[in-house]
Image (cartoon, coloured by chain):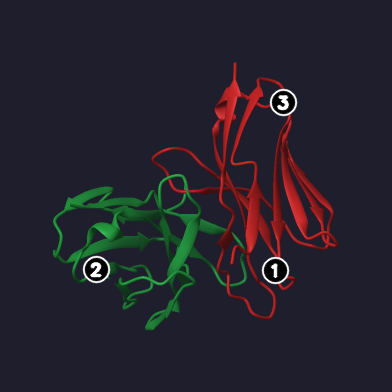
Chain colours: A green, B red
Amino acid sequence: EADIYQTPRYLVIGTGKKITLECSQTMGHDKMYWYQQDPGMELHLIHYSYGVNSTEKGDLSSESTVSRIRTEHFPLTLESARPSHTSQYLCASSETGRTEAFFGQGTRLTVV
Amino acid sequence: QQQVKQSPQSLIVQKGGISIINCAYENTAFDYFPWYQQVPGKGPALLIAIRPDVSEKKEGRFTISFNKSAKQFSLHIMDSQPGDSATYFCAASIHGSGNTGKLIFGQGTTLQVKP
């Protein structure tokens, strides 16, 4: 069982609210990622980090932002949620030199 | 531009049958090809992976076949069981000199194994 945790699991929030999705891993992995997955669709990379104070945008443009102040923590923030942000957000981590990425259970976000 | 194309979108197989899912990629720099299994309510979990220096990798009932010249790879599930019912994603990434580790996923295949 991978030690990567996401909270909350489900979130229903009104338009215009600021939200932060939490992701923590206890494996000491230096690389962390955020993927967005719409129902029945593939995962798209929206943010990644190669270590503390390192963040990069992924292949899919996203209005969200991320920070990496601690190795184990990689939160994602939406300053003003909109219905178009409704999706599942999956956090993952991997170790440099190793190929396997471990995924959290995801946060299913609904903006009404 | 879809860099990894996966087919079929859905698959129904009888228990004991063989499930085959295919993927094709475009970027020849990809050097790592994993398959992930996702069940409802959970994140994807690594099932099996292959590097382009081998043409086949087998782990239990799961086999990856890899054709570098055709830029295609496939997942074969032998003796499929109802417990294998899930969504399967192929993916590709660059782990060589680029060492990005970023995964490009296929569209997913929903597999249903009937008892």
Q: Chain of mark 1?
A: B
Q: Amino acid at mark 2?
A: Leu
Query: Quick one: B23 or B82, which is closer to the camera?
Result: B23
- The residue carrying pointer 1 sits among few (fewer than 14), some (14 to 19) or many (20 or more) residues within 10 Å by Cα, namely many
Q: Amino acid at mark 3?
A: Asp
Q: Is residue A25 left or right of residue B107?
A: left
Q: Amino acid at mark 1?
A: Phe
Residue at image position (33%, 68%) is: A73
Residue of label 3: B79
Between the C-alphas of marks 3 and 1, the distance is 30 Å
Instruction: Indicate which disc, 3 or 1, sits on the residue closer to the N terminus.
Output: 1
Query: Quick one: B58 or B16, which is closer to the camera?
Result: B16
Q: What secondary structure is marked by label 3?
A: loop
Same subunit: marks 2 and 1: no
Q: Are marks 3 and 2 in contact (CB under 8 Å)?
A: no
Q: What secondary structure is marked by label 1?
A: loop
Same subunit: marks 3 and 2: no
Q: Chain of mark 2?
A: A
Same subunit: marks 3 and 1: yes
Residue A102, given in percent of the width and then of the height, sits at: 50, 56
Residue A16, given in percent of the width and then of the height, sits at: 14, 65
Query: Quick one: A11 or B62, which is closer to the camera?
Result: A11
Between the C-alphas of marks 3 and 2, the distance is 45 Å
Residue at image position (62%, 76%) is: B99
Q: Is residue A77 left or right of residue A46?
A: left
Residue A78's disc number = 2
| Of marks 3 and 1, the one in the foreground | 1
| Of marks 3 and 2, the one in the foreground | 2
Q: What secondary structure is marked by label 2?
A: strand
Residue of label 1: B30
Kindly indicate the quadrant of the structure image that contains residue B8: top right
Query: Quick one: A5 or B29, which is closer to the camera?
Result: B29
